[in-house]
Amino acid sequence: MTRHLVVVGHGMVGHRLVETLRAQDTAGAWRITVLAEENRPAYDRVRLSAWFDGEDLDLSPVDGVEVLLGEPAVSLDPQARTVTTPRRTLAYDALVLATGSYPFVPPVPGRDLTGCFVYRTIDDLESLAAYARGRRRGLVVGGGLLGLEAANALRRLDLDTCVVEIAPRLMPLQVDEAGGAMLRRHIENLGLTVHTGRVLARIMGRDGAVRRVVFSDGGVLDTDVVVFAAGVRPRDELARAAGLAVGARGGVVVDLAGRTSAPDVYAVGECAQIDGRVYGLVAPGYAMAEVVADRLLGGSAEFPGADTSTKLKLLGVDVASFGTTEGPLDVTVTDPSTGVYAKLVLSDDAKTLLGGILVGDAHAYGTLRACVGAPLPAPPLALLAPDGPPAAGGDLPDTALVCSCNAVTKGTIVTAIREQGCTDVAAVKAGTRAGTTCGSCVPLLKQLLASCGVPASKALCEHFDYSRQELFDIMRVRGITTFSQLVAEYGRGRGCDICKPVVASILASMTSGYILDGEQAALQDTNDHFLANLQRNGTYSVVPRIPGGEITPEKLIVIGEVARDFNLYTKITGGQRIDLLGARVEQLPAIWRRLVDAGFESGHAYGKAVRTVKSCVGTTWCRYGVQDSVGLAVALELRYRGLRAPHKIKAAVSGCARECAEARGKDVGVIATEAGWNLYVGGNGGFRPRHAELLAKDLSTDELVTLIDRFIMFYIRTADRLERTAAWIERMEGGLDYLRSVIIDDSLGLAAELEAAMARHVESYVDEWRATLEDPERLRRFVSFINAPDVPDPSIQFTVERDQPVPVPIGRPA
Amino acid sequence: MTAVEMSVRPATVEAPASSPDQPTGTEAGWVVVCPYDWLEPERGAAALVGDRQIAIFRTHDGNLYAIDHYDPCCGTYVLARGIVGTRGDVPTVASPMHKQAYDLRTGACLDRPGVSVRTYEIRCRDGLVEVRCP
């Protein structure tokens, strides 16, 4: 009998509960309804300020759960076991309160004036952003974690920003006085003003809108916007009204199993008081969610206690604290030249690490946090050295918490590696959830893999011990231009279907020449070998290039005539062009003769290459367009056509923020703004869909093209075989920030070389199909049989479906 | 390891006097398919012998192999269009459809136990490639 679970609240912790329960409830014991107050699916509130970067904050939806958006619970009846929303009353077998918290607004006169905001939801950000437009000054009340996030938001909105904190230092809960002072230096260097030890007495307005604040010491400060970010309070009003026990300072009281005082009612996350404490961090919330999911399935899990360690990047400054931050002995480093402050708290025999604080550089956080309670793996100064702590993974005790976000111990990870056969970071993430939230423990995961004896194998296949990038470098530096020389000097055997196309792709990138001359022909997969795409019945498809999806009626007619004359099936592709399917090998030259004569050229649909640049009609036609998206798409497609890469590259240009070209689903996505173009990178559809992320904003067309040149060339040189740009960026240490430093700030000094390489490609481009048709030698491979070149393969047969030819299956696959 | 030179098919060589319908050969069962030089090193070619589709291969060391053109893993005639290479010491072709590798010497599929294709005798005589059809 299926039971009904109602989850009240659709934030990160509620979402985690539902996700865990769905994954573990394999028998389908629970039907789940989620009541969401906000009108949008669950999102990552921890990274709220990334909303300004246009980042996608949505959490991945969970199948088989009914989520009622915009429908908060208004009352709860634990006796009747029902919960009521403005629209209905639901009966439950179990109910979980995951209502989170609300922002605390101090009782300052004037706090209701227009221009006062809180910082909690995407709706808050949207109204803040709308109000801030055209205004000059902003003030944040609160110098803690949330306050500094909010200050970053105001800064992103181009306001002169000031932060007011009651305590004598910034982030008083996380860092000590010296750490707070270092943090303050960083923040003031960014041009923000910081007031510590000051209290707001009154907010004054004119015409109902904020104009100035008055401090309790009598000082005044003009401002247009006030954001309250001075902490949060648990949302326990529903529980209170229903008569559930709540703590003296708020929070629904729960036991270590997450149970409230009412039967079958649980509470998790920031609305709960567990073990006498209310936690405002996501990691303890996740731990509670997993406990309750286990209990709902008859388990006996208990809250293991919370790790309140945090590592954040606030206003671009690393801040971390872990374990206890006060203790018998400590080692501190204060370096004003680099802006680094670090403190390690040690036991009284100076042998055991108890906790610490890091400001300005938190690279050692992952290792240090996992060492809390364990012997120091190295002398303190070595641990804090800028080149990173020495490899420590192997020395940690099995109980060490490697991933605090998801409470995964070293023992669990080692078991996953040794017994479940996880052989890389991705497998460990999938198998244990470690490293899937903040990612700070990923370097430790790598160390643990290494210490378990899993070699970080880069070997391409049995013929080469090198990765694609290494082979690229070898061939470029040594000037190797044949597979035979490469395999003789750097490999073994005669290659295979993995390494040969890789070498073919590298050669194509290095030389930009015709890809089927000489020995290179033998390296190509059948698609590149016949410059067409193999289909399931042994025929091929033909895709002429239609740049930007723009095509004349005359050319459309030619495609139609060719399809009719050769009995081809036609279909519109997702890349705004036309696929002609069902061509036999020996028909390809005649088909392409007709197409080339009509002005078409190869669309490279068969290659790991730049495919299409999709576009919307832009300013040419659209009444909303702000830039000429078709013109840019055509120019980009012609610039990069024929470029071979580790995988296919797709691009799109949208003429306004409505994004009709779906540019954020592409490797390279361009979206028009009033001021120019925004460039997004690393998106794809397919098996694991991903939105592209913003690389740079408001670019001129020339700036845009330069950045795309560098991006694509850097990808071609350094990505692995069959690695799309999304996976490539994900794998990069430092991710998008690192990519930005290489592509925009030229941190590797590569930019000129990458641009020159692209310029060579653009200059040397020739249409492969035209080049093939012009050379009788090159045409000779297009025969059905070497001894009967014009006899069609008798096994290929067609039938008609919806007025078009489709294949008749030939044999039954084994 | 010997470097392999790509041989270009000489334009002067006439197609051999063989046709799929009337196999000709010097001995019983042997059928001339094409001049040796027409075969690209490390690439296959399909041949029609009688009504049988045969994939013939010239490997980097100059050896010749002949197996079915039909790939039982996908049920389509495509094996001659696969990538030729080695697995350990075994000369292989990988099906262009889903990349299963076949031993060119025995026809055994190395990735699907129990699956195999048939092999044919093949030789080079007077510069001509001949296949023996049972």
Image: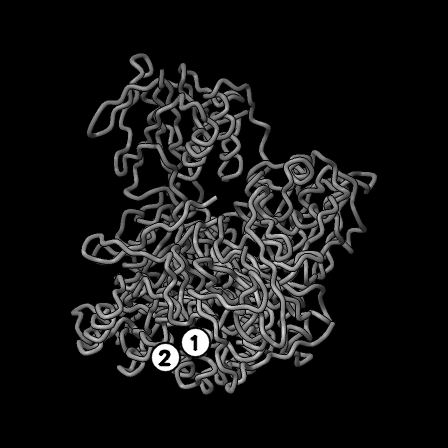
| Callout 1 secondary element | loop
| Residue type beneath disc 1 | Gly
Separation (CA) of disc 2 from disc 1: 9 Å
Viewer-closest of A603 and A802: A802
- Above or below, A42 against A546 in this view is above
Placement of the N terminus of chain A among the 4 image quadrants: top left
Q: Name the residue under label 2.
A: A638
Q: How many marks?
A: 2
Question: Disc 2 sits on a residue from what chain?
Answer: A
Viewer-closest of A19 and A478: A478
Q: Mark 1 points at which residue?
A: A642
Viewer-closest of A50 and A391: A391
- Residue A778 at x, y = what percent? 46, 80
Disc nearest the viewer among 2 and 1 = 1
| Residue type beneath disc 2 | Leu
Q: Is residue B28 left or right of residue A246?
A: right
- Graded by Cα atoms within 10 Å as few (under 14), some (14 to 19) or many (20 or more), the crowding at tag 2 reads some
Q: Can residue A187 be seen in this view?
A: no
- Graded by Cα atoms within 10 Å as few (under 14), some (14 to 19) or many (20 or more), the crowding at tag 1 reads many
- Residue A15 at x, y = what percent? 41, 36
